[in-house]
Amino acid sequence: CIGCGSEDVYGVTRIVGYYSKITNWNKNKIGELKDRHFGNYKLVVSE
């Protein structure tokens, strides 16, 4: 943990509004996570 220095941590990600522990995933699902594109995206709407 960056805040307290604890090593008792696990990864969590949000998929379609639900949070999921990455440690519960199989190897194929972890591969999908590595292929995802992360970033701050904005929706541009033109009139």
Image: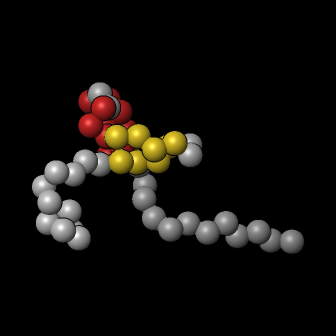
Front residue of 4 and 24: 4
**Colour style of the rendered protein structure:** secondary structure
In screen coordinates, is 31 left or right of 44?
left
Residue 26 percent across, percent down from the top left: 29, 28
Residue 33 drawn at (x, y percent):
36, 43
Front-most of 13 and 44? Answer: 13
Q: Is residue 5 left or right of residue 45?
A: left
- Work out whether residue 36 or residue 5 is closer to the camera in this orientation and state it: 5
Tell me if I can see residue 27 in this picture. Answer: yes
Residue 6 against residue 28 in the figure, above or below: below
Up-down: is 9 above or below 22? below
Q: Residue at x 31, y 40 (%)?
A: 22
Residue at image position (20%, 62%) is: 1
Residue 35 shows in this picture = no
Question: In which quadrant of the rendered image does the C terminus lie?
Answer: bottom right
**What x and y, as percent, mark residue 9?**
21, 51
